[in-house]
Amino acid sequence: MTVPIAVQLYSLRDVLPKDFAGVIHQVAAMGYAGVETAGFAGTTAQAAAKIFAAEGLQVCSAHSGLPLGDQKNEVLDTMAALGCKHLVHPYIPPEEFQSVASIHSHCDRINEANAVAQANGITLYYHNHWWEYEFVLEGRPAYQIMLDRLESSVLLEVDTYWVQVGGRDAAEVVAELGERAPLLHIKDGVATKEAAMLAVGDGVMNWASVMAAAGAAQWLVVELDRCDTDMLTAVGKSVTYLTSKGYGHGR
């Protein structure tokens, strides 16, 4: 049985502000089963949730700030408005990975947020870029240092492309992390830090091996950070590729 496919709406950040409802209608027509949010491009979480529901799209997860301090209530209210129980912390900048102490400090803050999330029925995730896999400190890659420090209830959204860019084998990492990583970001390209992404299936990623290792995946989330071709076309081509190969399913 395959897993559902969503699109990370950050991919469509340039077109969503012009016609949020119209673009989401196109996403649904492409066959996507869900969306992952990253802000609301000129609309609100409440209005966006109604649009998603009208199009039959599930909000599988939401990229967001942590539910701490002054933004705690805003984050929790947004998650409630979306009807979403999977909150993804999307980014720790690379300069924060220069020491084990710095990594531990960020992990401790994520653990603090995780306690708030769990108290509100929300699962907290961390999403990687390339540096968590390339940077080695005290003989260990940064992502393994994070795993040791984070509470086991903090899960991972593994960006398989960035893992590959960081010099690790994406399939091996997905297999290693297993049930700790039920959300997988799916993108493609030439696997360099600077290059724009390509539609899934048009780049160098070995999807057969990644998917063979992804038995614990619950969602595949297409994300193209940047693209030299038309983004809507690439997003549509990506879901068609994944479904045609039997790697996941749409609506």
Image (tube, grey):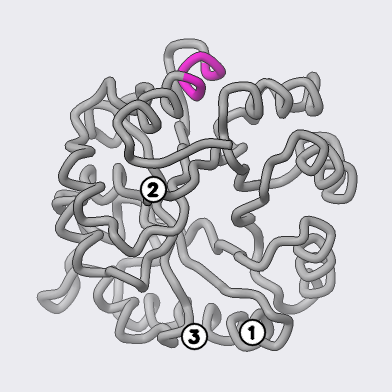
Query: Can you give x and y, in whole percent of width and height, for residue 125 in the image?
Result: 50, 68
Please give the residue where the numbered disc 1 appears in the rendered image: 118
Q: Which mark is residue 2?
A: 2
Task: Give the amino acid at mark 1.
Answer: Gln
Side of 249 relative to 205 (left or right):
right
Q: Secondary structure at mark 2?
A: loop
Few, some or many residues within 10 Å of mark 1 (<14, 14–19, 20+): some
Q: CA distance from mark 2 to mark 3?
A: 35 Å
Sequence-wise first label, 1 or 3 = 3
Report the residue at 52% width, 18% height from top.
231
Task: Give the amino acid at mark 3.
Answer: Asp
Please give the residue where the numbered disc 3 appears in the rendered image: 108
Confirm whether the magenta stretch covers residue 235.
Answer: yes
- Nearer to the camera, 210 or 160: 210
Confirm whether the magenta stretch covers residue 106.
Answer: no
Foreground: disc 1 or disc 3 = 1
Q: CA distance from mark 1 to mark 3?
A: 15 Å
Report the residue at 47% width, 44% height from top.
221
Query: Can you give x and y, in whole percent of width and height, for residue 15 in the image?
Result: 68, 21
- Nearer to the camera, 122 or 137: 122
Q: Secondary structure at mark 1?
A: helix
